[in-house]
Image (cartoon, grey):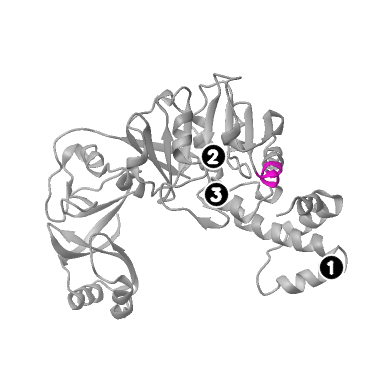
Amino acid sequence: MAPEQLDLLSSSDGQQLLGELAARSIGADDELRLIMQLRARFAPELVAAAVAQAKLRQRARAKFSRADRMYFTPAGLEQASTERMARYHAARFAAFGRIADLCCGVGGDLLALAGVKPVRAVDVDPVHLRMAVLNAGAYHVAQRVEPVLADVQSLVFDDDPGLALFIDPARRVDGRRLRGGETSPPLDWCFARGEMRPVLIKAGPALPLDVVPPAWGIEFVSEGRELKESLLSSPAMARPGRRATVLSAAPTEADPSGWASVSLEAMPGEAVAVASPGRFLLDPDPAVTRAGLVEDLARGLAGGSVWKLDPEIAFLSSDAPMVTPFGRCLRVESSEPWNLKRLQATLRSLDVGSVDIRKRGSAVDVESVQRRLRLTGARAATVVLTRVMGEPWALVCVDA
């Protein structure tokens, strides 16, 4: 987006038009007709900018409760943290005085950071920086934001030795996704900022772990069972080691609004046993598997009566239900070596008509299996294709 387009949207006509568009859903079928209708009342360039912005706001509702009062670019929205994740990031800075949000983009994290501390917001893109301040205004925290238009690598922070840094380096440049471990600014530059001060870096979930300095903490964060990011914390953030964090929307007594987080850390102990499937199967959250904490999770469940199905596969099993925010518990209704015809017969006998196929450690083509099952039953089930002690296996499960 050009600065002139943001000027148009900020005008009185722009605000009127955006307000009208907020009340309707813009679909592909009626977009052209809508544009032609609006051009009878507004300038064509304003209509184009407003319709594009309204469509971005529709998409942004999945991330922000106040999306209809915010401003986005496609790239800025894609990289922005969700409102829930931004609040989690901000909580990490509660003990520090001032924060600099480097590469702030459209301000997805800024709105939460400024809710806890004054923030220096830095970005090299003037449109993104203006949007960040406007978006902070939507959350009534703009007065706590100091915008700085600059390349973060040109800045020196010696004027504020107590300043804590939140860095969200870009993983796309000119619309091109960078290779794993490559960011702008480079991660090496980001890590160097953490030698003397508190630094939290938001990185991709597939980040090669060998690029992270040994003294830094690594935390994998998921939301709604989708692995979203890795958070890298400098020694001054006082969170060493590896962690898995799950954000959920379940209301709690402490937070009736529905935001909650739980974290799992390493739990040293004896190796977890390997055995055949029991009555229940636990599919660990992707943050747990990415953090390499599956066995640590097992050691904390059911007094040790939990085992793995295979030394290399991240499924856990037990003869009792496993209640944990760190995984989905399923009841096993059938467990047998992998064979397509046998699986078809089992599903028919269980009156299963629709399946969600989960694959881990299996070479089977899921799409081919889905096409060939041809089910007609009334029940829904989860089919798990995996290995059990090295052998291809199929489990038919339902929610516990």
Residue 245 in percent (x, y) is at: 39, 40
Q: Is residue 177 above or below residue 223?
A: below
Report which residue position mark 2 lands on. Answer: 86
The Cα atoms of the two marked residues, 3 and 1, are separated by: 32 Å
- Residue range in magenta is 125-131
The circle on residue 79 is 3
The Cα atoms of the two marked residues, 2 and 3, are separated by: 12 Å
Element assignment for label 1:
loop
Magenta span: chief secondary structure:
helix
Query: Residue flagged by tag 2: what amino acid is it?
Result: Ala
Residue drawn 61% across the image and 37% down it: 110
Query: Residue flagged by tag 1: what amino acid is it?
Result: Arg
In this rendering, would 398 be left or right of 115?
Answer: left
Residue 252 visible:
no
Residue drawn 46% across the image and 22% down it: 196
* Along the viewing direction, whichever of 375 and 65 lies nearer the viewer: 65
Q: Quadrant of the N terminus?
A: bottom right
Query: Residue flagged by tag 3: what amino acid is it?
Result: Gln
In this rendering, would 3 be left or right of 220?
Answer: right
Report which residue position mark 1 lands on. Answer: 39
* Along the viewing direction, whichever of 282 and 127 lies nearer the viewer: 127
Residue 293 in percent (x, y) is at: 27, 41
Nearer the observer: mark 3 or 1; the answer is 3
